Image (tube, grey):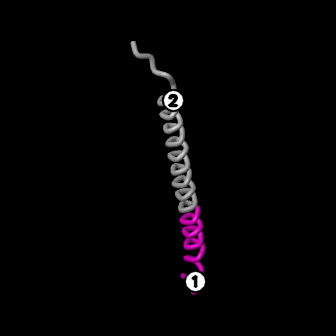
Amino acid sequence: MPYIEALVPTIVVALVFWFVIRAVSNVDRSERAAEAKVDEQIRLSAQHKDNKSPKSDN
């Protein structure tokens, strides 16, 4: 029984660490996806403005 009592805190800390790292990883992944979506919208908006602006035929 003393072996189990000695291992339980280590296992609990390892599980907490794993959950925290997983949460940080998920947040980073969703932030990157949202940033890519915004970048794409900005690129399309700029492209749309370029197509709308009058072009000079010199």
Question: Which quarter of the rendering shows the C terminus?
Answer: top left
Residue 11 falls within the magenta-colored stretch:
yes
Q: Which stretch is magenta?
A: 1-20
Q: Quadrant of residue 12?
A: bottom right
Instruction: Give the residue type at disc 2.
Output: Lys
| Amino acid type, label 1 | Pro
Magenta span: chief secondary structure: helix
Q: Residue at x 60, y 80 (%)?
A: 5
- Select label 1 or label 2 by which is in front: 2
User: Mark 1 and mark 2: span between their CA atoms?
Assistant: 76 Å
Residue in the image at 55% along x and 76% along y: 7
Q: Which mark is residue 2?
A: 1
Find disc 2 in the rendering and name its residue: 52
In the depicted structure, whether residue 55 falls above or below residue 19? above
Q: Residue furthest top?
A: 58
Residue 56 within the segment the image draws in magenta:
no
Q: Please state which of residues 9 and 16 is positioned toward the viewer in this rendering.
A: 16
